[in-house]
């Protein structure tokens, strides 16, 4: 397994046809390989009957960039009882500007049109987002008010969300991206399309419990 300063991603080698329900019922999920059960459950921010899914990612992770279209399409098909939140990781200090970028865009209501654009900027356009000035310049070119962006980036609200992201990352014992946290109980490492099939099976398991 690659360590925290690297991004992990295992490419799927074949088409996956098993349905989540079949997987959940047949018991073919392999604990320790397909997913990990957390030693200590993590409190969730959802109500009764809901299941929380956390996507741990980073804009600097090429595998997260490749996974994003799959994740977005999967999210569109989920029932309303499944609540998905993205959590930008911070494996070291260099990740903090990327975390702040995500939460600043979220606070300004611009994730819808700029989340994927941020991935594209980092990997295709070589925008490294290594500080406020670079991020603010990039956002301003896309119609975001620079002053509002700067104030939000430096706000207590964004700082608090960055701190909370680090707490969740540690609680889920995330050591690579992309990874999915399921219901405060399980962590699914990135395995391309297989990640989402495993997630579906674990969600079904939680809902049937």
Image (cartoon, helix red, strand yellow):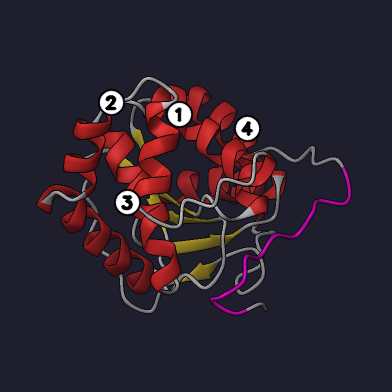
Residue on which the image places disc 2: 109
Q: Is residue 63 magenta?
A: no
The circle on residue 191 is none
Labels 4 and 1 touching (C-beta < 8 A): no
Q: How far is mark 3 from mark 2, CA to CA?
A: 14 Å
Q: Quadrant of residue 190?
A: bottom right
Residue 43 appears in which quarter of the rendering? bottom left
- In the picture, the disc for residue 114 is 1
Write down the region rendered in magenta: 3-14
What's the residue at 56%, 55% (across, down)? 60
Give neighbour class at mark 4: few <14, some 14-19, many 20+ (Cα, 10 Å). Answer: few
Q: How far apart are the alpha carbons under marks 4 and 1?
A: 14 Å
Mark 3 or mark 4, whichever is nearer to me: 3
Contact flag, marks 3 and 4 (Cβ < 8 Å): no
Nearer-N-terminus badge (3/1): 3
User: Which residue occupies the foreground of this view, 136 or 121?
Assistant: 136
Query: SS class of the residue under badge 2?
Result: loop
Name the residue carrying label 4.
69
Q: Is residue 118 left or right of residue 197?
A: left
Residue 207 seen from this side: no
Measure how far apart labels 2 and 4 are at the Cα level.
Answer: 20 Å
Residues at circles 2 and 4 in contact by the CB criterion of under 8 Å: no
């Amino acid at each position: 397994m690659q360590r925290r300063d690297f991004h992990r991603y295992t490419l799927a080698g074949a088409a996956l046809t098993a349905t989540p329900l079949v997987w959940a019922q047949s018991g073919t999920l392999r604990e320790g390989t397909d997913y990990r059960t957390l030693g200590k459950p993590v409190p969730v921010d959802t109500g009764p009957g809901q299941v929380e899914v956390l996507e741990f990612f980073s804009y600097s992770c090429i595998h997260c960039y490749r996974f994003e279209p799959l994740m977005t399409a999967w999210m569109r098909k989920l029932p309303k009882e499944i609540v998905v939140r993205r959590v930008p990781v911070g494996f070291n200090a260099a990740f903090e500007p990327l975390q702040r970028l995500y939460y600043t865009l979220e606070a300004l209501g611009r994730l819808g049109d700029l989340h994927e654009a941020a991935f594209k900027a980092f990997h295709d356009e070589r925008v490294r987002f290594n500080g406020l000035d670079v991020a603010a310049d990039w956002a301003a070119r896309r119609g975001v008010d620079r002053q509002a962006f700067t104030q939000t980036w430096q706000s207590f609200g964004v700082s608090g969300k960055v701190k909370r992201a680090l707490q969740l990352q540690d609680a889920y014992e995330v050591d690579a991206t992309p990874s999915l946290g399921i219901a405060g109980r399980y962590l699914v490492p990135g395995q391309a399309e297989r990640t989402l099939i495993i997630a579906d099976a674990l969600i079904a398991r939680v809902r049937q419990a």
